[in-house]
Image: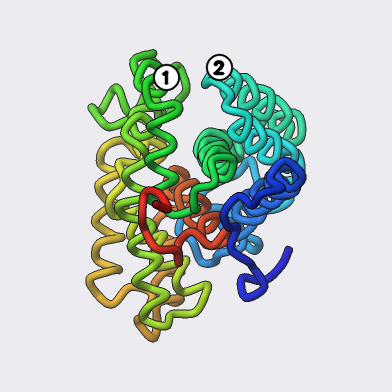
Amino acid sequence: MSAPAQQRPLGRRPRDADAILAPVARDLGRAAAAALYDELALSPKPGLVTLISNGSHDDMDARTFFRSIAALRGYFVRIARLGMAGADFEALERAGIEAEARMLAATGGINTHRGAIFLLGLLCASAGALIAAGRPLTPAALQAMLDERWGAALHRRAQRPSMLPGGMAARRHGLRSASEEAALGFPAVFDVGVPAMRSARTRGLSHERAQLDTFFHLMAALDDSNLAHRGGLEGLRFAQQTARGFLADGGAAHPFATARAEALGQEFEVRRLSPGGSADMLAAVCWMVRIGAVDAVDAVDGR
């Protein structure tokens, strides 16, 4: 995978668009898989699996995530192509269900990336639709396209009761579910994660420190149903308050940010807390960095 300095923005659709749509879909999909690696490689990351820690998990490690990412590479390319072709939500959902089956087959039934399949898949489809329409890739344009093409279907989906652990925890505690977050256009990603990443980069934080700062901003703001499932409402509020304290004390710009995050990780592991929803959203922001969207002018269209 190429380093961030070697990444190139994906631009407007040229005249010979039909000849280049397939390679662009490949680039979007590869960036999504690379963003999942970015999220995995970030360390320390309290409660979550990294290259050197299993976090709060006994059933998965970095090798599990590598197998999962490898199984999902083709999916992200495929769903970007579906977005380019103007596919309806049912086609996107079928692709996601098939990708989840491949993930579970690769991991022996362990859920490593179910949330990322949903979130990053929709974003790849939205990017594909923008490229096909000749519109620039910016965060605002991605969010607007998501609502324009699939917003009504996402609102209908949000009315369906989820039988997944995170969905049931959200319903039990009166939290916003992942489906509801999607129906609203992923505000945690676009209103919290992207501004946090932009701010960190503007302040000159290193690539890793910018990711760490973004992660803590997401954890501070998001009603992460993974945390609610594992630790109840008390566990969720503990994680949010911990993240806010980390940020109030300088965040990732603090000279001892790494040591502080490692210490927090030990507390998370004692409580068996794992902010998986925040990790998925961090991956989404990393994907936008890789395709050049975070640094793009934030306009809804290019007119």
Q: Gap between marks 1 and 2, in whole Å?
A: 9 Å
Image quadrant of residue 296? bottom left
Which of these two is toward me, 248 or 90?
A: 90
Residue plotted at (61% across, 40% down):
112
Q: Mark 1 or mark 2, which has the lower sequence index?
A: 2
Residue plotted at (35% across, 21% down):
155
* Vertical side of 242 occupied by 108: above or below: above
Q: Which colouring convention does the figure follow?
A: rainbow
Q: Secondary structure at mark 1?
A: helix
Q: Position of residue 98 (x, y in %)?
A: 68, 23
* Vertical side of 123 occupied by 44: above or below: below
Q: Position of residue 25 (x, y in %)?
A: 68, 44
- Contact (Cβ within 8 Å) of mark 1 with mark 2: yes
Q: Give the farthest residue toward the front.
A: 15
Q: Secondary structure at mark 2?
A: helix
Please, what is the three-letter code of the amino acid marked with disc 1?
Answer: Ala
Q: Residues within 10 Å of mark 2 (few under 14, many from 20)?
A: few
Which of these two is toward me, 49 or 267?
A: 49
Residue plotted at (42% across, 53% down):
302
Q: Residues within 10 Å of mark 1 (few under 14, many from 20)?
A: some
Q: Position of residue 282 (x, y in %)?
A: 47, 54
Residue plotted at (61% across, 62% down):
41
* Residue 300 visible here: yes
Please, what is the three-letter code of the amino acid marked with disc 2?
Answer: Glu
Quarter of the image with the N terminus in it: bottom right
* Vertical side of 64 occupied by 42: above or below: below
**Residue 134 as seen in the image, left or right of residue 258:** right
Q: State the residue position of label 2.
A: 90
Q: Give the farthest residue toward the bottom.
A: 255
Image quadrant of residue 228? top left
Q: Which mark is residue 153?
A: 1
**Residue 252 as seen in the image, left or right of residue 246:** right
